[in-house]
Amino acid sequence: VSEVIVLDVGHGNSAIALGNDFALLIDAPDDPAVLFAIADLRIERFDFVVISHRDRDHVAGLPAVLANSSLSIGTVFVPADATKNAASYQTKHLLGALADAKKSGRARVSRDLDDAIGNELSGGGLTVDVLAPPFDLAMGGPGGHTSEGSEILSNTTSAVIRVGRDGGGSVLLAGDADRVAFEALAGQGADLSADILVFPHHGRDSRLSNEREFAEWVCGLVSPEKVIFSVGRGAIARPSPDVVLGVKAARPGVYIACTQLCRECAPDPLPTGRTDGHLGSLPASGAADMHSCAGTLRISLVDAELGAPDPSAHQQFIDAWAHDPMCRRT
Ligand SMILES: [Zn+2]
Ligand SMILES: [Zn+2]
Protein backbone atom coordinates (compact mmCIF):
# COMPACT_ATOMS: atom_id res chain seq x y z
CA VAL A 1 0.00 0.00 0.00
CA SER A 2 1.28 3.45 -0.83
CA GLU A 3 -1.23 6.06 -1.73
CA VAL A 4 -2.47 9.52 -0.89
CA ILE A 5 -6.19 10.21 -0.76
CA VAL A 6 -7.32 13.82 -1.13
CA LEU A 7 -10.84 13.96 0.25
CA ASP A 8 -13.66 16.03 -1.18
CA VAL A 9 -14.63 17.89 1.99
CA GLY A 10 -16.15 20.95 0.34
CA HIS A 11 -14.26 24.09 1.31
CA GLY A 12 -11.36 22.81 3.41
CA ASN A 13 -8.57 20.27 3.25
CA SER A 14 -8.14 16.71 4.35
CA ALA A 15 -5.77 14.05 3.07
CA ILE A 16 -4.92 10.53 4.17
CA ALA A 17 -1.57 8.90 3.36
CA LEU A 18 -1.42 5.12 3.55
CA GLY A 19 1.72 2.97 3.68
CA ASN A 20 2.35 -0.56 4.89
CA ASP A 21 0.84 -0.66 8.39
CA PHE A 22 1.12 3.09 8.41
CA ALA A 23 -1.44 5.86 8.15
CA LEU A 24 -1.19 9.62 8.38
CA LEU A 25 -4.08 12.10 8.49
CA ILE A 26 -3.38 15.65 7.40
CA ASP A 27 -6.11 18.10 8.41
CA ALA A 28 -9.57 17.34 9.71
CA PRO A 29 -12.33 19.79 8.78
CA ASP A 30 -15.83 19.30 10.14
CA ASP A 31 -17.14 17.30 7.20
CA PRO A 32 -18.72 13.84 7.34
CA ALA A 33 -16.49 12.61 4.48
CA VAL A 34 -13.52 12.47 6.88
CA LEU A 35 -14.97 9.89 9.29
CA PHE A 36 -16.81 8.02 6.51
CA ALA A 37 -13.57 7.65 4.54
CA ILE A 38 -11.69 6.44 7.63
CA ALA A 39 -14.39 3.79 8.11
CA ASP A 40 -14.52 2.78 4.43
CA LEU A 41 -10.74 2.44 4.30
CA ARG A 42 -10.90 0.35 7.49
CA ILE A 43 -8.22 2.48 9.12
CA GLU A 44 -7.74 1.40 12.73
CA ARG A 45 -4.77 3.53 13.60
CA PHE A 46 -3.22 6.84 12.60
CA ASP A 47 0.47 6.95 13.44
CA PHE A 48 0.31 10.71 13.05
CA VAL A 49 -2.40 13.32 12.73
CA VAL A 50 -1.08 16.64 11.50
CA ILE A 51 -3.16 19.81 11.65
CA SER A 52 -1.56 22.21 9.16
CA HIS A 53 -2.84 25.31 10.96
CA ARG A 54 -5.70 26.31 13.20
CA ASP A 55 -8.25 27.62 10.69
CA ARG A 56 -11.67 26.00 10.96
CA ASP A 57 -11.64 24.44 7.52
CA HIS A 58 -8.58 22.40 8.58
CA VAL A 59 -9.16 21.61 12.26
CA ALA A 60 -12.86 21.76 13.21
CA GLY A 61 -13.34 18.01 12.76
CA LEU A 62 -10.42 17.00 14.97
CA PRO A 63 -12.56 16.55 18.13
CA ALA A 64 -14.73 14.04 16.22
CA VAL A 65 -11.64 12.14 15.04
CA LEU A 66 -10.38 12.00 18.63
CA ALA A 67 -13.80 10.84 19.82
CA ASN A 68 -13.85 7.93 17.34
CA SER A 69 -13.21 5.02 19.69
CA SER A 70 -12.50 2.56 16.88
CA LEU A 71 -9.36 4.53 15.98
CA SER A 72 -6.06 4.47 17.80
CA ILE A 73 -3.86 7.53 17.37
CA GLY A 74 -0.14 7.99 17.89
CA THR A 75 0.74 11.66 17.90
CA VAL A 76 -1.43 14.66 17.03
CA PHE A 77 0.51 17.73 15.90
CA VAL A 78 -1.45 20.93 16.34
CA PRO A 79 0.10 24.40 16.45
CA ALA A 80 -0.29 27.08 19.07
CA ASP A 81 -2.11 30.10 17.63
CA ALA A 82 -2.60 33.26 19.64
CA THR A 83 -4.83 34.76 16.94
CA LYS A 84 -7.64 32.26 17.58
CA ASN A 85 -10.30 33.61 19.93
CA ALA A 86 -9.76 31.70 23.18
CA ALA A 87 -13.31 32.53 24.30
CA SER A 88 -15.04 31.09 21.22
CA TYR A 89 -16.95 27.85 21.42
CA GLN A 90 -14.83 26.33 18.65
CA THR A 91 -11.52 27.02 20.37
CA LYS A 92 -12.76 25.80 23.75
CA HIS A 93 -14.17 22.64 22.17
CA LEU A 94 -10.93 21.91 20.30
CA LEU A 95 -8.63 22.62 23.23
CA GLY A 96 -10.86 20.62 25.57
CA ALA A 97 -10.73 17.60 23.27
CA LEU A 98 -6.95 17.88 22.94
CA ALA A 99 -6.43 18.28 26.68
CA ASP A 100 -8.61 15.21 27.34
CA ALA A 101 -6.67 13.20 24.75
CA LYS A 102 -3.35 14.22 26.24
CA LYS A 103 -4.33 13.63 29.88
CA SER A 104 -6.02 10.30 29.21
CA GLY A 105 -3.20 8.97 27.05
CA ARG A 106 -5.60 8.71 24.10
CA ALA A 107 -2.91 10.34 21.93
CA ARG A 108 0.29 12.28 22.34
CA VAL A 109 -0.32 15.95 21.59
CA SER A 110 2.53 18.04 20.29
CA ARG A 111 2.92 21.66 19.17
CA ASP A 112 6.37 20.88 17.79
CA LEU A 113 5.98 20.60 14.02
CA ASP A 114 8.29 22.57 11.73
CA ASP A 115 10.86 21.95 9.03
CA ALA A 116 13.51 20.98 11.60
CA ILE A 117 11.62 17.71 12.07
CA GLY A 118 12.64 16.81 8.50
CA ASN A 119 11.45 13.32 7.53
CA GLU A 120 10.87 12.00 11.07
CA LEU A 121 7.20 11.31 10.28
CA SER A 122 8.12 8.79 7.57
CA GLY A 123 6.88 5.21 7.84
CA GLY A 124 5.43 2.19 6.07
CA GLY A 125 7.59 2.74 3.00
CA LEU A 126 6.48 6.37 2.66
CA THR A 127 8.81 9.33 2.95
CA VAL A 128 7.06 12.19 4.72
CA ASP A 129 8.96 15.49 4.49
CA VAL A 130 7.83 18.37 6.67
CA LEU A 131 8.91 21.37 4.58
CA ALA A 132 7.02 24.12 6.44
CA PRO A 133 6.50 25.98 8.62
CA PRO A 134 10.11 27.08 8.78
CA PHE A 135 11.45 26.84 12.33
CA ASP A 136 11.70 30.60 12.91
CA LEU A 137 8.17 31.33 11.61
CA ALA A 138 6.79 28.55 13.81
CA MET A 139 8.66 29.82 16.87
CA GLY A 140 7.13 33.27 16.45
CA GLY A 141 3.72 32.00 15.48
CA PRO A 142 0.63 33.72 14.11
CA GLY A 143 0.23 37.30 15.30
CA GLY A 144 3.89 38.19 14.94
CA HIS A 145 6.03 39.64 12.20
CA THR A 146 8.91 38.28 10.16
CA SER A 147 12.36 39.89 10.40
CA GLU A 148 11.43 41.69 7.14
CA GLY A 149 8.31 43.09 8.80
CA SER A 150 5.67 40.92 7.08
CA GLU A 151 2.66 39.96 9.16
CA ILE A 152 2.60 36.30 10.19
CA LEU A 153 -0.95 34.96 9.83
CA SER A 154 -2.23 31.48 10.67
CA ASN A 155 -1.84 30.62 6.98
CA THR A 156 1.78 31.83 7.01
CA THR A 157 2.60 29.12 9.55
CA SER A 158 0.72 26.37 7.70
CA ALA A 159 2.45 23.02 7.47
CA VAL A 160 3.59 22.04 3.97
CA ILE A 161 4.15 18.30 3.69
CA ARG A 162 5.43 16.14 0.86
CA VAL A 163 4.48 12.46 0.88
CA GLY A 164 6.38 10.23 -1.50
CA ARG A 165 7.85 6.84 -2.06
CA ASP A 166 11.40 5.95 -3.03
CA GLY A 167 11.51 5.40 -6.77
CA GLY A 168 7.86 6.42 -7.02
CA GLY A 169 5.79 9.56 -7.04
CA SER A 170 5.17 12.36 -4.58
CA VAL A 171 2.37 14.68 -3.52
CA LEU A 172 2.94 18.12 -2.00
CA LEU A 173 0.18 19.07 0.44
CA ALA A 174 0.62 22.82 0.70
CA GLY A 175 -2.07 23.58 3.28
CA ASP A 176 -2.87 27.27 3.28
CA ALA A 177 0.76 28.46 2.97
CA ASP A 178 0.82 32.04 1.69
CA ARG A 179 3.31 34.21 -0.17
CA VAL A 180 5.28 35.08 2.98
CA ALA A 181 5.65 31.37 3.73
CA PHE A 182 6.77 30.50 0.21
CA GLU A 183 9.23 33.42 0.22
CA ALA A 184 10.77 32.00 3.40
CA LEU A 185 10.97 28.51 1.87
CA ALA A 186 12.44 29.78 -1.40
CA GLY A 187 14.86 31.98 0.55
CA GLN A 188 16.32 29.00 2.36
CA GLY A 189 16.55 27.00 -0.87
CA ALA A 190 14.01 24.34 0.15
CA ASP A 191 13.39 21.62 -2.44
CA LEU A 192 9.63 21.78 -3.03
CA SER A 193 9.49 19.56 -6.12
CA ALA A 194 6.64 17.06 -6.38
CA ASP A 195 4.66 15.23 -9.06
CA ILE A 196 1.35 16.42 -7.72
CA LEU A 197 0.54 19.68 -5.93
CA VAL A 198 -2.51 20.28 -3.79
CA PHE A 199 -2.51 24.01 -4.42
CA PRO A 200 -2.20 26.22 -1.32
CA HIS A 201 -5.20 27.97 0.19
CA HIS A 202 -7.79 26.38 -2.10
CA GLY A 203 -6.42 28.33 -5.04
CA ARG A 204 -7.38 31.79 -3.95
CA ASP A 205 -5.83 34.54 -1.85
CA SER A 206 -7.50 37.92 -1.86
CA ARG A 207 -4.48 39.45 -0.11
CA LEU A 208 -2.40 38.90 -3.24
CA SER A 209 -2.21 41.73 -5.73
CA ASN A 210 -1.30 39.31 -8.52
CA GLU A 211 -2.66 35.80 -8.08
CA ARG A 212 -1.57 34.68 -11.53
CA GLU A 213 2.04 35.60 -10.87
CA PHE A 214 1.92 33.83 -7.46
CA ALA A 215 0.55 30.66 -9.05
CA GLU A 216 3.21 30.71 -11.79
CA TRP A 217 5.93 31.19 -9.20
CA VAL A 218 4.69 28.42 -6.89
CA CYS A 219 4.29 25.98 -9.81
CA GLY A 220 7.81 26.89 -10.92
CA LEU A 221 9.09 25.89 -7.46
CA VAL A 222 7.13 22.63 -7.35
CA SER A 223 7.06 21.59 -11.07
CA PRO A 224 3.93 19.45 -10.70
CA GLU A 225 2.41 17.27 -13.47
CA LYS A 226 -0.97 17.46 -11.77
CA VAL A 227 -2.54 20.21 -9.65
CA ILE A 228 -5.46 19.61 -7.30
CA PHE A 229 -7.69 22.29 -5.84
CA SER A 230 -9.56 21.33 -2.67
CA VAL A 231 -12.64 23.51 -2.99
CA GLY A 232 -16.35 23.69 -2.23
CA ARG A 233 -19.11 24.82 -4.53
CA GLY A 234 -19.55 27.98 -2.48
CA ALA A 235 -20.64 31.43 -3.51
CA ILE A 236 -17.02 32.52 -3.91
CA ALA A 237 -15.33 31.08 -6.96
CA ARG A 238 -12.45 28.96 -5.84
CA PRO A 239 -9.91 28.54 -7.28
CA SER A 240 -9.62 32.02 -8.73
CA PRO A 241 -9.49 32.10 -12.53
CA ASP A 242 -6.15 33.95 -12.38
CA VAL A 243 -4.59 31.19 -10.28
CA VAL A 244 -5.70 28.53 -12.77
CA LEU A 245 -4.28 30.58 -15.64
CA GLY A 246 -0.99 30.95 -13.75
CA VAL A 247 -0.80 27.20 -13.16
CA LYS A 248 -1.37 26.53 -16.86
CA ALA A 249 1.18 29.15 -17.91
CA ALA A 250 3.86 27.67 -15.67
CA ARG A 251 3.05 24.04 -16.48
CA PRO A 252 1.63 23.61 -20.00
CA GLY A 253 -0.22 20.32 -20.29
CA VAL A 254 -0.78 20.10 -16.52
CA TYR A 255 -3.72 17.98 -15.37
CA ILE A 256 -6.03 20.06 -13.18
CA ALA A 257 -8.62 18.57 -10.85
CA CYS A 258 -10.97 20.36 -8.45
CA THR A 259 -12.71 18.36 -5.74
CA GLN A 260 -16.01 20.18 -6.34
CA LEU A 261 -17.61 21.82 -9.35
CA CYS A 262 -17.14 25.57 -8.88
CA ARG A 263 -19.88 28.06 -9.76
CA GLU A 264 -17.28 29.84 -11.87
CA CYS A 265 -17.10 26.74 -14.11
CA ALA A 266 -20.75 25.73 -13.98
CA PRO A 267 -23.11 28.48 -12.75
CA ASP A 268 -26.42 27.82 -11.04
CA PRO A 269 -28.71 26.24 -11.95
CA LEU A 270 -26.69 23.16 -12.76
CA PRO A 271 -28.02 21.30 -15.78
CA THR A 272 -30.32 18.44 -14.92
CA GLY A 273 -29.63 14.91 -16.01
CA ARG A 274 -26.03 14.93 -14.71
CA THR A 275 -24.52 11.64 -13.74
CA ASP A 276 -21.53 11.22 -11.47
CA GLY A 277 -20.51 7.71 -12.42
CA HIS A 278 -16.96 9.02 -12.89
CA LEU A 279 -16.49 9.43 -9.12
CA GLY A 280 -14.47 6.93 -7.14
CA SER A 281 -16.07 4.76 -4.49
CA LEU A 282 -14.82 6.67 -1.42
CA PRO A 283 -17.07 9.24 0.26
CA ALA A 284 -17.13 12.72 -1.28
CA SER A 285 -18.85 15.65 0.41
CA GLY A 286 -20.27 16.94 -2.86
CA ALA A 287 -21.67 13.62 -4.03
CA ALA A 288 -25.07 13.88 -2.32
CA ASP A 289 -25.93 17.13 -4.12
CA MET A 290 -23.92 16.14 -7.20
CA HIS A 291 -21.57 19.05 -6.52
CA SER A 292 -18.38 16.99 -6.87
CA CYS A 293 -16.19 17.46 -9.94
CA ALA A 294 -13.21 15.16 -9.37
CA GLY A 295 -14.61 14.41 -5.89
CA THR A 296 -12.30 12.41 -3.65
CA LEU A 297 -9.01 11.62 -5.40
CA ARG A 298 -6.89 8.52 -4.88
CA ILE A 299 -3.26 8.88 -5.94
CA SER A 300 -0.94 5.90 -6.23
CA LEU A 301 2.54 6.75 -5.02
CA VAL A 302 3.95 3.97 -7.19
CA ASP A 303 3.58 6.14 -10.28
CA ALA A 304 1.80 9.35 -9.14
CA GLU A 305 -1.21 8.37 -11.27
CA LEU A 306 -4.83 8.78 -10.30
CA GLY A 307 -6.61 5.61 -9.26
CA ALA A 308 -9.84 7.57 -8.90
CA PRO A 309 -11.53 9.28 -10.50
CA ASP A 310 -10.59 7.85 -13.85
CA PRO A 311 -9.01 10.85 -15.62
CA SER A 312 -10.78 10.36 -18.95
CA ALA A 313 -14.17 9.90 -17.28
CA HIS A 314 -13.54 13.06 -15.23
CA GLN A 315 -12.70 14.97 -18.44
CA GLN A 316 -15.90 13.70 -20.07
CA PHE A 317 -17.88 14.90 -17.04
CA ILE A 318 -16.35 18.37 -17.39
CA ASP A 319 -17.03 18.46 -21.14
CA ALA A 320 -20.63 17.42 -20.62
CA TRP A 321 -21.66 19.52 -17.63
CA ALA A 322 -19.34 22.45 -16.98
CA HIS A 323 -20.41 25.53 -18.93
CA ASP A 324 -17.09 27.35 -18.99
CA PRO A 325 -14.52 25.33 -17.02
CA MET A 326 -11.50 27.25 -15.75
CA CYS A 327 -9.25 24.28 -16.49
CA ARG A 328 -10.04 24.68 -20.21
CA ARG A 329 -9.48 28.44 -20.42
CA THR A 330 -6.44 29.93 -22.12
ZN1 LIG B 1 -8.10 26.68 4.28
ZN1 LIG C 1 -6.19 28.94 6.53
Image (cartoon, rainbow, N blue to C red):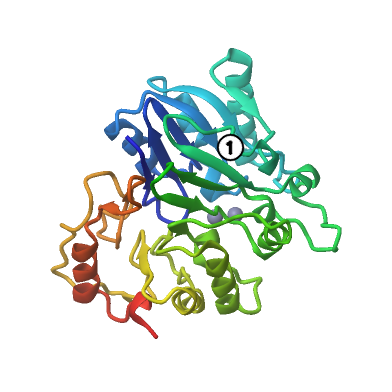
Q: Which residue is mark 1?
A: 119
Quadrant containing the C terminus is bottom left
Q: Is residue 123 above or below residue 85?
A: above
Residue sitting at the far bottom:
330
Residue 296, position as x, y percentages in the image: 32, 51
Quadrant containing the N terminus is top left
Q: Is residue 186 above or below residue 91?
A: below
Direction from residue 13 to residue 156 in the image, left or right: right
Q: Quadrant of residue 213?
A: bottom right
Question: In percent of the image, x 40 and y 64: which residue is there?
Answer: 225
Q: Quadrant of residue 101?
A: top right
Question: In percent of the image, x 71 and y 45: which residue is there?
Answer: 85
Is residue 204 at all visible to an observer of this figure?
no
Answer few, some or many: residues within 10 Å of disc 1's Cα (few below 14, many 20 plus, some between 14 and 19): some
Direction from residue 257 to residue 85 in the image, left or right: right
Closer-to-camera residue (21/113): 21
